[in-house]
Every structure is written in structure tokens, then in C-alpha cells.
Image (spheres, helix red, strand yellow):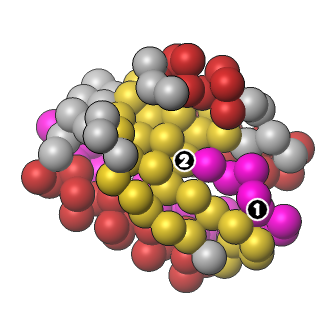
Amino acid sequence: MFELVRQSSHLVATFEGILTDDDFIRCFTEIVSISIEEPNTSLLVDLSGTERISVGSGTVRRAADLFKSLSKSVTRKVAIIAPREEIFGMARMYELMRPPSPSDLTVFRTATGAKEWLGVS
């Protein structure tokens, strides 16, 4: 399950429970839609409530492809919180597969580090 919430200065995508292919793609579709209107809004992706990942590498590749058309025009900072080893690995896989972009994306193990890097509280 995921929830995408607009905070005052950034977006927060929170995943909980079992992360499925459908959740992953649905979230990316929503983020891409918002990115068209707000290309500079920072994004915090919180995977700390995720118990298990059921997302294939093909889905990660598909998510990266969804972003491809916007990759040159979106200039945001994206911080991913991924405290568990397998979740951190999936987040790093996306980081490596995503198309070249002026947006900065960094994977963190703690919320503190991610929020400090984004400059949000």
C-alpha cells in the first residue's frame, strides 16, 4: 500500500506492508503526473514501513521508463528512505536504472539523513 501526500514544500510517498508491482507502478504514475505540473517539488519516498518487497526488476525498469519522458525537464531532489537491506538494494537498483536527469536522487538508510539532505523537517 502507498500514499502520496503533498506537504508545504515537498511531496511524501509512503509505502507500508508488502510493496507490490502494482503499488510501485501506480505510485510512479502519480508522481509523473504531478511532475508535469510541479517539476521542481522535492520528493521524499519513505520505505521504512515496508515489510516485504514483491517487485520484480522488470517493474523497476518499467518505472524508470515512465520517468524517461520527463527526465530532462524535472529538476527536483528525491530522497529515498530504505532502512532494510533488501529494500535498500531495490532502491539502489532504481537509482542505477533511471534515465540521466538533472534531478538528484539519493538513497538513505535513515529518515534523519534523507530529511536533512532535502532541507525539510
Q: Label 1 belongs to which residue?
A: 50
Q: Residue at x 55, y 81 (%)?
A: 22
- Quarter of the picture containing the N terminus is bottom right
Amino acid at the residue labelled 2: Val
Answer whether residue 118 is magenta in the image. Answer: no
Q: Position of residue 10 (x, y in %)?
A: 34, 39
| SS type, badge 2 | strand
Q: Is residue 104 left or right of residue 96?
A: left
Residue 45 numbered mark, or none: 2
Total labels: the figure holds 2
- For residue 96, what is the image quadrant? top right
6 or 107: nearer the viewer: 6
Q: Residue at x 29, y 40 (%)?
A: 8
- The span from disc 1 to disc 2 (Cα, nearest Å) is 11 Å
Instruction: Bin the neighbour count of mark 2 within 10 Å (Cα to Cα): few under 14, some 14-19, many 20 and up.
Output: many
Q: Position of residue 86 (x, y in %)?
A: 85, 51
Residue 72 numbered mark, or none: none
75 or 64: nearer the viewer: 75
Q: Is residue 38 visible?
A: yes
Q: Position of residue 7 (x, y in %)?
A: 35, 46
Q: Residue at x 76, y 75 (%)?
A: 18
99 or 19: nearer the viewer: 19
Q: Which residues are magenta?
A: 46-73
Q: Position of residue 40 (x, y in %)?
A: 21, 34
Examine the rendered structure and indicate whether residue 112 appears above or below residue 59: above
Examine the rendered structure and indicate whether residue 94 appears above or below residue 104: below
Which residue appears farthest toward the right when viewing the image? 85
Amino acid at the residue labelled 1: Thr
